Amino acid sequence: MIDTHAHLDTLCDIDRGVDKIILAASGMKDSKNNLILGEKYPEKLLASLGIHPMENQDSPAELKKLVDENYKKIVAIGECGLDFSSDFDKEKQIIVFKKQVELAQKYKLPLIIHARKAVDETVEILKEYKNLSGVFHCYAGGNKRIKKIIDLGENWYFGIDGNLTYEDGLVEIVKNIPKDRLILETDCPYLTPVPFRGEINSPKNVEYVYKKVAEIWGMSFEETEKIIDANAKILFSID
Ligand SMILES: [Zn+2]
């Protein structure tokens, strides 16, 4: 199992049972911390560097410097993107997002995309660039935007989280996502799946998301794990 999206502050959260954990970054502080964690546990923890759209106090120039110095040590850029669910400065979000798309393109790294109430706008920006890859983390574009993301190219994936275990609408969405485009994540400490809903989430709980997908696909856990992990390995270039 691979948890393709976790926020970890400390090492106490490293769990047995999960082969790899991709550390998503919300801002500069997380990005620096992810590098430290990734260097300490290179077999298990894979770092991403980025600035979340709601964290735009952080400077994209500072992020660029960090990526320029460390691109060989990381597996992705993000999470970054657009969040139009509040009145956060949209213009600034777009500028900060585009800077990160440029970094991903320069270093051939996948993007971990956060898009809320802005999937269409995010897709339009991505279409301006060539040779990108990435994941729409915690995909929230509904059934009607699945095709839009597939049309971005074969290097684009859908990230699904623990809310799959309690949101019926997401079950339908998973049925409509091609099997070779799905990866799973916890987004811990958030989005704890059933049966631990209400508790703080951790990477090991990604197991319940795998189990739910296996149930939806009507396949064994092992077959499901094989397909999902192969997808994550392709996207993040994991050996
Ligand atoms: Zn996240």
Image (cartoon, rainbow, N blue to C red):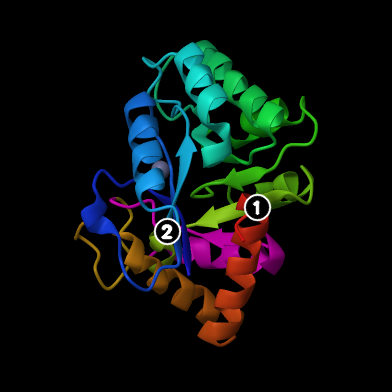
The label nearer to you, 1 versus 2, is 2
Residue pictured at 57% horizontal, 33% vertical: 71
Q: Whole-percent x and y of residue 109? A: 64, 38
Residue in the foreground of this view, choosing between 63 and 151:
63
Mark 2: amino acid: Lys
Find residue 44 and name its label: 2
Mark 1 neighbour density, 10 Å: few (under 14) some (14–19) many (20 or more): many
Residue in the foreground of this view, choosing between 186 and 86:
186
* Looking at the image, residue 58 lies above or below residue 163: above
Question: Any atom of ligand 1 within 8 Å of the CB at mark 1?
Answer: no
Residue pictured at 62% horizontal, 25% vertical: 103
Please say whether residue 186 is one of the residues in the magenta stretch: yes
Q: Who comes first in sequence, dot 1 or dot 2? A: 2
- Magenta stretch in the rendered image: 166-189
Ligand 1 rendered quadrant: top left
Find residue 235 and name its label: 1
